[in-house]
Image (spheres, rainbow, N blue to C red):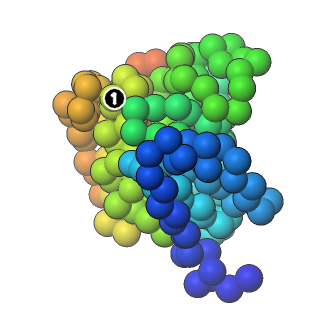
Amino acid sequence: MSAATHDFAETWHYSGDDLLEAFLALETPEGFKAELIDGEIIVTPPPDTNHEIAIGRFVRQVFRNCAADLDFAPGIGLVVPGGRFIPDGTFIERGAMADRESWSEPMGVLMVLEVTSSRPEKDREAKRKGYAAARIPLYLLVDRQRNELVLYGDPGAGDYASALRVVLGAVLPLPEPFGFALDTADLVG
């Protein structure tokens, strides 16, 4: 599979009551993921290796440096206002989402992580607003196209009230329960 194939994302539009039904009935090929974002069904292929390496390095730092006992889920389906999202990574209070269905309310979710790929505008806008409306305390966006990380906090009904931006390579302080300085240089290369 060529690198260009990894940037492909397909979108279907439905109207009215058929949208959720069509989404839930969708069968995607292995490795692909389907999300319902702002009235669109978006199917994306498996991510590129740099995308996945960044996630792995972030998770390693959290488990090495965070004193809190947390669960991590790399592909959990969250039901949020505005759709059904699958974050690249979800940090959860230990046991808070055990034995849940494949699509669940985000109870006990402490932080979601997204690494931009083929549709960065969805991560920057629609997903950010959906996570905020769901009252997820922290949203960390690794924006590879803009070469920055943005940590959103203080969720409200329509958006996050705070955003801390650093260039990729700088240190990003993560608040409690994480409570450590994230080395963002470790997320690439």
Element type at mark 1: helix
In the figure, is residue 19 to the left or right of 129?
A: right
From this view, report whether residue 141 is shown above or below residue 158. Answer: below
How far from the left and from the top, in percent, is residue 24? Answer: 66, 43
**Number of dots carrying numbers:** 1
How far from the left and from the top, in percent, is residue 143? Answer: 38, 59
Question: Toward the viewer: 100 or 146?
Answer: 100
Question: Toward the viewer: 107 or 10?
Answer: 10
In the figure, is residue 115 to the left or right of 149?
A: right
Amino acid type of disc 1? Answer: Ala
Residue lying at 70% horizontally and 47% vertically, measured from the top left: 25
From this view, report whether residue 109 is shown above or below residue 118. Answer: above
In the rendered image, which quarter contains the C terminus? bottom right
Q: Residues within 10 Å of mark 1 (few under 14, many from 20)?
A: some
Specify the farthest residue to the right.
30
Query: Dividing the picture into quarters, in which one does residue 121 lie?
Result: bottom left
From this view, report whether residue 161 is shown above or below residue 6. Answer: above
Question: Toward the viewer: 128 or 174?
Answer: 128
How far from the left and from the top, in percent, is residue 156? Answer: 25, 25
Query: Dividing the picture into quarters, in which one does residue 145 lie?
Result: bottom left
Residue 71 seen in this snapshot: yes
In the figure, is residue 170 to the left or right of 85?
A: left
How far from the left and from the top, in percent, is residue 1? Answer: 74, 82
Residue lying at 40% horizontally and 62% vertically, measured from the top left: 120
Residue lying at 44% horizontally and 52% vertically, measured from the top left: 15
Q: Which residue is mark 1?
A: 133
